[in-house]
Amino acid sequence: MLLKASIIFLALALTAAFEGESDTSTLNASGFEGSLGPFSPCNQKSPSYAQAVSKSPVYAGSSKLEVYFDESNYDGTRDDKGAEICHFGSGTTNAILKKEGYQGFALYVPSSSFPTDKSTIVAQQFCPGGCSSWCGTLAIMGNQLVVDHRSSCGTPTQQVIVSSIARDTWNSVIVRFKVSAAEKGAYEVRYNGSNVYSSKNINVGFGDSWSDDAPTSGFYFKNGYWYDVSDGQTDGRSVVDPS
């Protein structure tokens, strides 16, 4: 079967405001105008792809990120499981967020070329230390938007946060992810301006070791656009808000 998902992540830098403790000033964003930069494709194998394209519909500007996944002839390797984009520190493939980050994007799910009977992760928070796996995800399951987060590579906390995703239109998504092993973490999601999920004072994230209640191996986001709040004085929700 051939599956195609036009899933778009667009970045708009706005003023900052968010309830809760946060920190700083590192914004990584793309409008996908001619390139993916500063992001790059990761974990994908032809004919699957994630690429910047200039064609309707667009959320802003003239381009978008289009993600296409071909699940036929799956060979069992990690790179053949999907198509993703990532951003790492210069010259590394390591995580570059330490304690807390915000991930914002606009999501377009086409009715004609995206399935209603599959499970597809559209945003991920990845903890490379310890068991080296995801510590949080947003996934389209059927036509629901579902959140998962965990503090180890065991069974996650899972919740349906949107019962039916509107198709053939743009939907704004913001994720707040704050790691902790001392029940001071948070996982929150806003969808089209509404706070649809909020779990605070939790353990979330993992790594080989911890320092100042954060994994020394850090974490990173997969998909399109994020804001690091690790060492400053600024809140982050509005910074990544695509609305």
Image: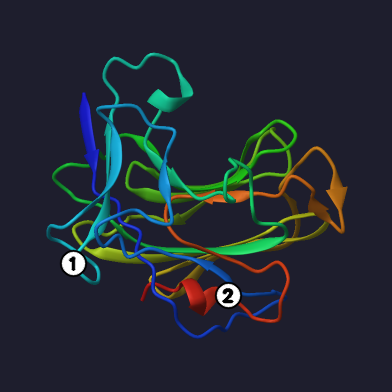
Q: Residue beneath label 1, please?
A: 62
Query: Count of labels shown?
Result: 2
- x, y percent for residue 112: 13, 45
SS class of the residue under badge 2?
Answer: loop
Q: Nearer the viewer, residue 231 or 121?
A: 231
Colour treatment of the image = rainbow
Whether residue 80 is situated above or below residue 214 in the rendered picture: above
Quadrant in which the C terminus is drawn: bottom left
Tell whether 232 sits left or right of 73.
right
Residue flagged by tag 2: what amino acid is it? Gly
Q: Residue beneath label 2, please?
A: 236
- x, y percent for residue 2: 20, 28
SS class of the residue under badge 1?
Answer: loop
For disc 2, the neighbor class at 10 Å (few under 14, some 14 to 19, many from 20) is many
Quadrant in which the N terminus is drawn: top left
Task: Determine the image quadrant of residue 200.
Answer: bottom right
- x, y percent for residue 157: 63, 45
Tell whether 14 sits left or right of 158.
left
- x, y percent for residue 201: 77, 63
Task: Determine the image quadrant of residue 50.
Answer: top left
Q: Is residue 58 visible?
A: yes
Residue flagged by tag 1: what amino acid is it? Ser
Residue drawn 65% across the image and 81% down it: 234
Whether residue 233 is situated above or below residue 190 in the rendered picture: below
Q: Nearer the viewer, residue 220 or 40?
A: 40
How far separated are the C-alphas under marks 2 and 1? 26 Å
